[in-house]
Amino acid sequence: MKTFRMGGIHPKAYKFSAGMKIQPATIPQQVIVPLGQNLGGPSLAIVVPGDMVKVGQMIAKASGFVSANIHSSVSGKVNKIDVALDSSGYKVPSVYIDVIGDEWLETIDRSLEIKRECLLTPPEIIKKISDSGIVGLGGATFPTHVKLSPPPGKKAEVLIINAVECEPYLTCDHQLMLEKGEEILVGVSILMKAIGVNHAVIGIENNKKDAIEHMQNLSKTFEGIQIIPLKVRYPQGGEKQLIDATIGRQVPSGSLPIEVGAVVQNVATTFAIYEAVQKNKPLFERIVTITGKSIYKHGNYRARIGTPLSVLVEQAGGAPEDTGKIVAGGPMMGRALSSLDVSVAKGTSGVLFIPSLESARKKMSNCMRCAKCVKACPMGLEPYLLMKESERSMWNEMESDRIMDCIECGCCAFSCPSNRPLLDHVRFGKTTVGKIIRNRQVKK
Amino acid sequence: MNIIIISILTLLVVGAISAIVLFIVSKKFKIFEDPVINKVVEVLPSVNCGGCGFPSCRGFAIACQKAESLEHMVCTVGGLQTMERVATILDKKAGSQYSTVAVVRCGGSCKIRLEKNQYDGVKSCSIAHNLYGGHTGCAFGCLGFGDCKVSCKFNAIDLNPLTGLPEIDEDKCTSCNACVRACPKAIIELRRKGIKSHRIVVNCVNKDKGSRIIESCPVACTGCGKCVKECAVDAITLTNNLAYIDSTICTLCGKCLEVCPTKAIIEVDFPGRKHLIKMDQTVI
């Protein structure tokens, strides 16, 4: 069975919420829609307090090419445009909307009927995706239309769909494939048309056997779509790792996947693209997994963007008493939340409750040069060395040791027997070196 | 016998050739250095802190010798006295640069700015800042892991265990700028030392709007602007909901302290004035 060639680890899966039907989440009294939900420029609000909005109406427009539109997830009245907490504890501008009823825009097709025919031309499809504010729903929230517009001179050869879901605990993509398999495949064929390729592969990890089987059965009626079961290994959902695992090409250091002719999209993004292109429905809701070892009701919820996490958690039976950390996203790449007042954003794939016994960091001891981190690193870096350099502020050395290739997957810190905080230091070094490089480019 | 003479002669010839080569090289590639530079280096503090903006005390001395006037050259460690001595050596006029001191602009101690979440990562302000907003409701305030203390070469900064905030020993502080650069939240600022170290400072860097700050920190500057109206010499400006007192204009009259509703403006080192709350009392 295929997998990527370098590094990687195998954490326990803990997929408690696997096979649980996607339930609609309660619509709260008030939603708080953050304006900076994507990588790149934050969006600019186009509504003013007092405006009445409908579900699916645009409330903020993209501030540049690498930016995305934001649409209202509820119907009601704009209360105010003010700052609100984001998942990292900083305050970001957000639109507060008081919910009145649930009135959708007339243009949105709400029927469940599957529309397989797409008569739009590729530029029209990309325009529609861009208008619908679709971003990568795997967690990185990179605007999708940017990924679909390769730089001049580059040609996409193959489309890769990321249905790996290598993070432990999370099951939102798995469940989406089981329930909306055909829609996803239509989305894949729309994407293939948009970028002009006739071959697409869907990579699914082998611990989701039912999803693999289901998708394989469905894909028989679609041309050029191949399902590839992959060996269970973290971080297979990383873009570069997935390209290596599925088509066996390695992306050179510092370049984009288009360099090897690949375009990678997440499976949830593909579903959002289907809805946007075929049903005229912009991106205003997503599937969020709520799980944890001691939570009462695990589940996959379809939540409107802007729903406060506290409302969602309430629906899942409240936070367990022994909670030590609440993490937005998976346990490996996700970040601990400082408050449950944070609202669901386009990149929120899950809310994970970690018991206090497991959440505390263990005592750190000295590095014993066992090189487990070097073996685990999927990008071929030397995390122990990068940590030392970061501690000593040796930024130039870090840059030549390819710190910018780090994908912050956390394999190094996971595998360290001395419990050294490798990722903390490496991530700090990466931010600092990134700033230095940007400053240098500005000077030029 | 013969062999000894040959060896001595060979050595002499090699020695002579080397001497000639060295002589030519030393004449040809000689770099003239003004002896005055060494004299200047002698009066400088030789701590190589970099506070003057030059990589070492020697670099500063060379820059002083080349500079047309010493108006903008200042040795932060040595202060005015040293600059006057440098000026006499170089026969130039010393600038009238006032001496400065590092000031921590955050009054959110453990007791008034309550912890809302626990951080168990690496105990470093810059790493914590890179990760998230902070352990309290205020995303602008001091994180309290002491990056400034680590950066200080003169042991002038200590973390007060009661308040969790750094405190600067003014006698030791040389205003070398190291802590200002180390603080990821940009809380520390170099301010004019003033007469007898009297100072009036806005003890906050929070740029949020008023109503929200008070929930997380009762001694924060809310940007109400009362001090701006009160100030007779226009030393206070209000930008991004934060008042700032220009220490070069401030006359230390103390009117702003009285009108500040949250006591975010504090005065330091005024032993005579009892009617105003001193820093230590508000903080602990």
Image: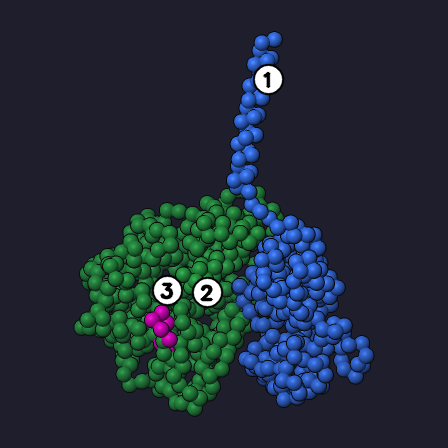
Chain colours: A green, B blue
Q: Does residue A71 show up?
A: no
Residue at image point 59% right, 82% down: B237
Q: Nearer the viewer, mark 2 or mark 3?
A: 2
Q: For this view, does A195 lie left or right of residue A379? A: left
Mark 3 Cα within 10 Å, few/some/many (few <14, many 20+)?
many
Q: Which residue is mark 3?
A: A173
The Cα–Cα distance between marks 1 and 2, rounded to whole angstroms, is 83 Å
Looking at this view, is A303 or B152 the one in front?
A: B152
Amino acid on which disc 2 is placed: Gly
Q: Which residues are the magenta region? A: A63-71
Q: Which residue is mark 2?
A: A329
For residue B258, above or below residue B268: below
A84 and A359: which is toward the camera = A84
Residue A120, located in which quarter of the rendered image? bottom left
Q: Position of residue A413 (x, y in %)?
A: 52, 52
**Measured from the top left, where is residue A208 in percent x and y?**
36, 58
Instruction: Residue B8: give its label.
Output: 1
Q: Left or right? Give the position of B47 relative to A158.
A: right
Asked whether disc 2 touches disc 3, contact meaning CB atoms under 8 Å apart, the reply is no
Which residue is located at x 40 percent, y 69 percent?
A: A40
Asked whether B45 or A416 is in front, the reply is B45
